[in-house]
Image: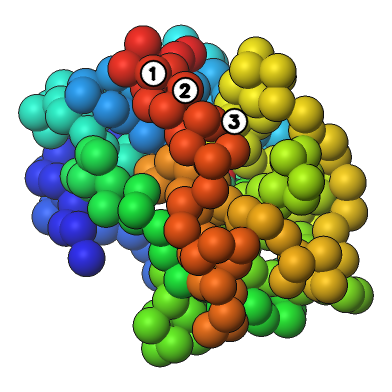
């Protein structure tokens, strides 16, 4: 597991991570009343920052948490975490909680609280070792119905990912009512007869910044793609399955529940999309 780098953002300033202290009355701690983003940085260049900050805006608005910073201030916080921690390839983690209340009450005060903002940076390997492909398992999607909000209350995701790890797999793909939603910490794309399918946007699915970038690449490459529900049967019969997430990029799934996906090797459509995605990273896609 990668260890976070020494410089963090907390309470309006850059500070050593080791000195950050959060109140036990913070609603993020008591209720998971908080949202987050993980923004990738490749070779010192922040990748798709505005797409992440747009999603942060939407998550905060959905939970009626005041956005404590203007867009330019968020960019400065991200840039400061990158430079203070020495650049390179990083995951910048940003978390905003509703704030610390005077006591513990499920309902929040009408006049709001001062949100708690925390940021840190963790090194990520680039190129990522998962680019050679991973094994995955399927799990029931036990999460709540508002997964479009990137909330830190992630217990069902934690248990699904742990089940994957204990099965020797790198990800758990989630099935709800017989349909693929996404994975414990990534979006899922499926290739069927040369067409790339992604489950359509829905409250039960987090809109992925990486899968959005991959879909734009497919369009540019002239590879057919559609937003379409993917049943469990279609998932299991797919020619290729990919997962997509900020710090992993786009990764082929070679085996699902112990059976090979397609040929059991990274597929030809993935190879084209992944090569173009690497170029976008090198160009410092915004
Ligand atoms: C549940 C879930 N879905 C999808 C994603 C992919 O989102 P992104 O590509 O923006 O990292 C993540 C990333 O953390 C996630 O946790």
For numbered disc 3, what is the local secondary structure? Answer: helix
For numbered disc 1, what is the local secondary structure? Answer: helix
- Give the spatial CA distance, label 2 vs label 1: 5 Å
* Quadrant that contains the N terminus: bottom left
Label 3 within 8 A of ligand 1 by Cβ: no
Question: Tags 2 and 1 in contact by the CB under 8 Å rule?
Answer: yes
The answer to which of 266 and 64 lies nearer the viewer is 266
104 vs 284, left or right, is right
Residue named by callout 2: 276
**Where residue 5 sits in the image (x, y, percent)?**
14, 46
Instruction: Rate crowding at label 1 as few (under 14), some (14 to 19) or many (20 or more) other CA atoms within 10 Å.
Output: few
**Where residue 12 sits in the image (x, y, percent)?**
33, 31
Label 2 within 8 A of ligand 1 by Cβ: no
* Residue drawn at the location 57% of the way across and 80% of the way down: 259
* Residue drawn at the location 22% of the way across and 34% of the way down: 89
Residue 89 drawn above or below residue 206: above
Residue 68 drawn above or below residue 186: above
Quarter assignment of residue 154: bottom right
Q: Nearer the viewer, mark 3 or mark 2?
A: 2
**Residue 189 bears which disc, if any?**
none
Question: Tags 3 and 2 in contact by the CB under 8 Å rule?
Answer: no
Instruction: Rate crowding at label 2 as few (under 14), some (14 to 19) or many (20 or more) other CA atoms within 10 Å.
Output: some
* Residue drawn at the location 12% of the way across and 55% of the way down: 18
- Give the spatial CA distance, label 3 vs label 2: 9 Å
225 vs 3, left or right, is right
Residue named by callout 1: 279
Residue named by callout 3: 214
Question: Tags 1 and 3 in contact by the CB under 8 Å rule?
Answer: no
The answer to which of 67 and 279 lies nearer the viewer is 279
* Residue drawn at the location 57% of the way across and 51% of the way down: 242
């Amino acid at each position: 597991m990668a260890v976070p780098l020494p410089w963090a953002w907390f309470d309006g300033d850059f500070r050593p991570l080791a000195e950050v202290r959060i109140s036990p009355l913070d609603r993020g701690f008591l209720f998971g009343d908080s949202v987050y983003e993980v923004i990738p940085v490749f070779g010192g260049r922040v990748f798709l920052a505005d797409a992440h900050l747009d999603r942060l805006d939407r998550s905060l608005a959905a939970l009626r948490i005041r956005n404590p910073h203007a867009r330019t201030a968020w960019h400065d916080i991200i840039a400061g975490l990158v430079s203070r921690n020495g650049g390179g390839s990083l995951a910048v983690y940003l978390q905003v909680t509703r704030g610390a209340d005077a006591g513990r009450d499920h309902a929040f005060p009408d006049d709001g609280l001062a949100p708690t903002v925390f940021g840190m940076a963790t090194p990520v390997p680039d190129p990522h070792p998962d680019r050679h492909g991973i094994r995955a398992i399927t799990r029931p999607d036990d999460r709540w119905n508002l997964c479009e909000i990137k909330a830190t209350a992630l217990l069902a995701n934690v248990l699904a990912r742990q089940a994957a790890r204990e099965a020797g797999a790198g990800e758990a793909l989630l099935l709800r009512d017989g349909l693929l939603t996404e994975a414990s910490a990534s979006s899922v794309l499926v290739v069927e007869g040369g067409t790339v399918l992604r489950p359509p946007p829905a409250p039960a699915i987090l809109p992925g910044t990486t899968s959005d970038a991959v879909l734009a690449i497919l369009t540019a490459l002239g590879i057919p793609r559609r937003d379409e529900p993917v049943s469990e049967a279609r998932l299991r019969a797919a020619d290729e399955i990919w997962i997509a997430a900020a710090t992993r990029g786009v990764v082929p799934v070679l085996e699902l529940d112990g059976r090979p996906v397609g040929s059991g090797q990274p597929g030809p459509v993935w190879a084209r999309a992944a090569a173009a995605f690497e170029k976008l990273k090198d160009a410092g896609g915004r």
